[in-house]
Amino acid sequence: MSAQVYIFRIQRNMPGQVGAVQSHWQEYSVEAEPNTTILTLLEVIKGQQDGSLTFRQSCRSAICGSCAISISGRTRLACKTHVGAVAKDGVVEIAPQKNQPILRDLAIDIRPFFARVHGIKPYLQEGPEKAGKVTSTAYDQVNHVTQCIMCACCYSECTMAEVNPAYIGPAALAKAFRFVSDPREGKKTERLQALSEPNGIWSCTRCTMCVDVCPKEVAPMEAIVKLRTRGLGKGYGDSAAAKHALAFHEDIVKTGQLNEFTLMMRTLGILGSMKETAMALHLAKKGKIPSPFPHSIQGVEELRKIYASLERTPVDVETKAKQAVPE
């Protein structure tokens, strides 16, 4: 591959008064081959052009997660990203992670992120649910989520974190699943109850951004879905989001399609639905009020048979890590 000139458009951030951050864009020109990593070129810029440029780095091997930044509009590991794969017309736009406080230039304050992780009690607890015997396959789930390197790429791209700073976030919830699925954990039910509270597992919008950007293929959203399933299994379905999901399930089994006329009532309850009266009137004015008596779709009987079969013999849909060592 032949070298070419790339323009790095980097967001420079400096702390201002009263915690405000003053930002501007600065461009640098570097010559490199397309398979050169973004981190290498940031080091070139810092070492040869501008020593004041601030960013984090450590292992250079996609293990520590320190160099996670926004590259061409998507949060990625700078040490794992080749410039030729992300440059658009020879330009690479670099910015700090999203949804995080900025300290300087590309360096973010990682304390709020790790406070969320610490909040889920990331350690094993003694309790009555601790397994007396551990099988050879008991750690399939644990092994999958422990591949997380806490780079915060998922939190940076999380659409719910963008609008709700109180949301625990995908990384912390994936870490929580690591303990809920661990046979040595003694307080699984207690954890599920806490995670079912507001700003927990039911706040996820399932936008899949965390799955798309995870550099280690942890798929945090899958862990969140599994936590929801386990939480519902323990009876923690009082939140509006949980009731919404249960209403979906009930309708699909019954008629094969949603009963949107009663969906809001079953999700929010009487008082909650009354708060949406203005919206309901607006929909009625536009002729968009659905029928309260939806007809069953063709073939719904076959659909019910599938549900019945799954209830009798549930399919193991839990994601498992690849075998790390020979059996």
Image (cartoon, rainbow, N blue to C red):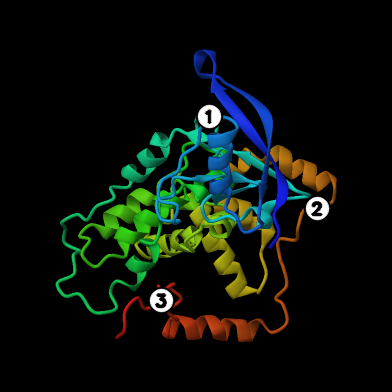
Left/right of residue 144 with respect to residue 30 in the rendered view:
left
Residue 123 seen anywhere in this rendered image of the structure: yes
- Going 78% across and 46% down the picture, which residue do you hit? 283
Q: Position of residue 288 (x, y in %)?
A: 80, 52
Q: Is residue 52 above or below residue 270?
A: above
Q: Residues within 10 Å of mark 3 (few under 14, many from 20)?
A: few
Q: Is residue 220 above or below residue 136?
A: above
For marks 3 and 1, give the CA distance. Answer: 43 Å
Q: Position of residue 18 (x, y in %)?
A: 51, 14
Instruction: Say which element carries label 3.
Output: loop
Q: Amino acid at mark 2?
A: Lys
Label ID, residue 322: 3
Instruction: Say which element carries label 1.
Output: loop
Q: Is residue 306 above or below residue 278?
A: below
Residue 271 seen anywhere in this rendered image of the structure: no
Instruction: Say which element carries label 2.
Output: loop
Of the pair 185 and 277, the residue shown nearer to us? 185
Q: Residues within 10 Å of mark 2 (few under 14, many from 20)?
A: few
Q: Residue furthest top?
A: 17
For marks 2 and 3, give the CA distance. Answer: 48 Å
For marks 2 and 1, give the CA distance. Answer: 60 Å
Of the pair 10 and 313, the residue shown nearer to us? 10
Mark closer to the observer (3, 1)? 1
Give the residue pinned by disc 1.
51
Q: Amino acid at mark 3?
A: Lys
Label ID, residue 288: 2
Q: Are marks 3 and 1 in contact (CB under 8 Å)?
A: no
Q: Amino acid at mark 1?
A: Gly
